[in-house]
Image: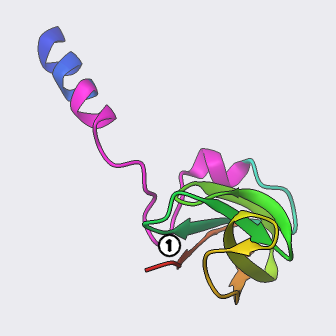
């Protein structure tokens, strides 16, 4: 039984790390304070995510940000944009997923 548990654990670790479109783990959501939400920018580009011109994180990872409208751009550095900018509303206390750079 221990071997089966270990095999199941190693299989679970190999699963993709991308969160579901509408949910994040309850532990992760509990870490958010009032007025915050997670933004997940899905992209084939492995690059930086800028919110209103400020470096916020990288693509394909959860980023904690204020909820409400966010102006998002992808780029290697400030001013060296790889995508057009777009506005996405980040939901409070939830995960908002957007696809860019397709």
- How are the residues colored? rainbow
Find numbered disc 1 in the image and state the secondary structure of the residue it sits on.
loop
Q: To which quarter of the image does residue 88 belong?
A: bottom right
Residue at the image point whose x is 29% and y is 44% from the top: 15
84, 94: nearer the viewer: 84
**Looking at the rendering, in which quadrant would you find the C terminus?**
bottom left
Q: Locate residue 76: give its quadrant.
A: bottom right
Instruction: Please check the rendered image and state whether residue 25 is part of the magenta-colored stretch, yes or no.
Output: yes
- Toward the top, the furthest residue is 2
Which residue extends farthest front? 80
Above or below 25: residue 66: below
Residue with the mark numbered 1: 22
Residue located 85% across and 56% down the image: 33
At x 22%, y 32%, the residue is 11
Q: Is residue 12 left or right of residue 101?
A: left
Q: Residue at coordinates 78% horizontally, 83% vertically from top-left?
A: 71
Residue bounds of the magenta highlight = 10-30
Between 87 and 89, which is closer to the camera in this rendering? 87
Q: Position of residue 68 (x, y in %)?
A: 81, 82
Residue 86, percent from left and from top: 68, 89
Q: Nearer the viewer, residue 83 or 89?
A: 83
Above or below — where is 30 with respect to 12? below
Instruction: Give x and y (percent) for residue 37.
Output: 73, 66
Tag count: 1
- Position of residue 1 measured from the top left corner of the image (x, y, whole percent): 12, 13
Question: On screen, 26 above or below 101?
Answer: above
Q: Quadrant of residue 47?
A: bottom right
On whether residue 94 falls in the magenta region, the answer is no
Crowd around label 1: few <14 · some 14–19 · many ≥20 (10 Å): few
């Amino acid at each position: 039984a221990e071997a089966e548990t270990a095999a199941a654990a190693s299989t679970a670790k190999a699963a993709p790390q991308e969160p579901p479109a509408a949910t994040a783990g309850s532990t992760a959501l509990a870490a958010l304070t009032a007025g915050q939400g997670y933004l997940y920018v899905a992209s084939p580009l492995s690059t930086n995510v800028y919110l209103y011109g400020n470096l916020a994180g990288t693509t394909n990872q959860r980023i904690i940000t204020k909820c409400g409208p966010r102006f998002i751009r992808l780029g290697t550095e400030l001013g060296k944009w790889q995508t057009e900018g777009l506005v996405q509303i980040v939901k409070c206390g939830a995960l908002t997923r957007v696809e860019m750079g397709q």
